[in-house]
Image (cartoon, helix red, strand yellow):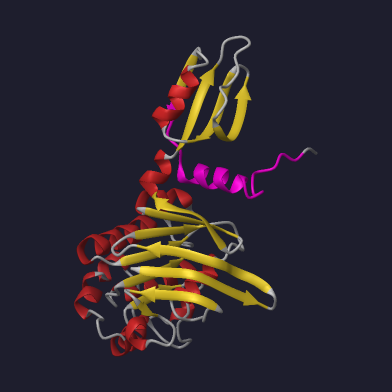
Amino acid sequence: MIEVKNVTKTFDGFKALNDLTLTVPTGAIYGLVGPNGAGKSTIIRHVTGILRQDSGEILIDGNPVYENPAVKSNIAYIPDDVFFFTQATIGDMMKFYRGVFPNFSTERYEKLRKAFDLNEKAKMRSLSKGMQKQAAFWLTVCMCPKVLVLDEPVDGLDPVMRRQVWSILMSDVAENGTTVLVSSHNLRELEDVCDHVGIMSEGRLLLEQSLSDLQENISKVQLALPDGGVLPEGLSILHKSSTGRLQTIIVRGGAEEVTNKLATCSPLFMDVIPLTLEEIFIYELGGEHYEVKDIVF
């Protein structure tokens, strides 16, 4: 389990993390999302022990991370911009990782060779960004970490390789109970793989829930009201739009609760539509003045 408790971090007077608290359950894939500058990469660098917080605690299985080699030996991290030694080949990096990480599995490395189909003798600097990302996943998964931290993990990969990488990660979670913290702007992909989601804004956590609970607590409804009809009071409406008589509303609350309230205004038509993680992200952040703005030219 990853526990971030009341963590604050300031850079030159700018508060990048503001009393941040979040919890990643053991064996979960936790999607950390938020706008640019929300503090996602900053908290990731704290969780991996690269940065030290000004205040608060960061624990993995109850132990502090910073300057704790025993804990950090069980953490693997793939940043947005991967780094390798300039003159090294994939084979060289494999030997380096094998010497540093006690759980590195040569057997797993050999099994994954076909999945990535990369030239082990090619120097890392000669590979494209996408191929470097593939090499990073190949090597990192072989480290057999208890905690895997990913920052924009599939950026630069083609659709087939993206699916291949997520498949490997999900199998690792299912079989070995690996705990995964992933930050990405690709909410469509996160929706397919994550079981928990945290939404950050301005260095703090807006909400944290399992994905299923999050989707159950916000409803998207299309309805048409009779002439003179108005929406009932007491609805927590996050967004409303209309095309002619047809209205689309995003309402905080479960589908049954919301439709029961809406039924009191005798709608001519009403339908509940599944809400995507991307829509939840947009409408939750709308209250933080981060909504999509209409620009008139």
Image quadrant assignment for residue 282: top right
Return the residue nearer the eye: 159 or 22.
22
x then y, percent, for residue 51: 52, 80
The residue depicted at 57 percent of the width and 66 percent of the height is 39
Residue 169 shown left or right of residue 107 in the figure = right
The N terminus, quarter of image: bottom left
x then y, percent, for residue 169: 31, 62
Q: Is residue 53 magenta?
A: no
Image quadrant assignment for residue 84: bottom left
Residue 153 in sight: no
Q: Is residue 276 magenta?
A: yes
Rendered view: 163 above or below 7: above
The residue depicted at 50 percent of the width and 75 percent of the height is 56
Query: In the image, which residues are magenta?
Result: 271-295
Instruction: Farthest residue to the top: give it.
Output: 227
Tally of marks: 0
x then y, percent, for residue 5: 46, 69
Return the residue nearer the eye: 177 or 168.
177
Residue 68 shown left or right of residue 289 in the figure = left
Return the residue nearer the eye: 93 or 277.
277
Rendered view: 98 above or below 219: below
Residue 36 in sight: yes
The residue depicted at 55 percent of the width and 46 percent of the height is 284
The residue depicted at 61 percent of the width and 45 percent of the height is 286
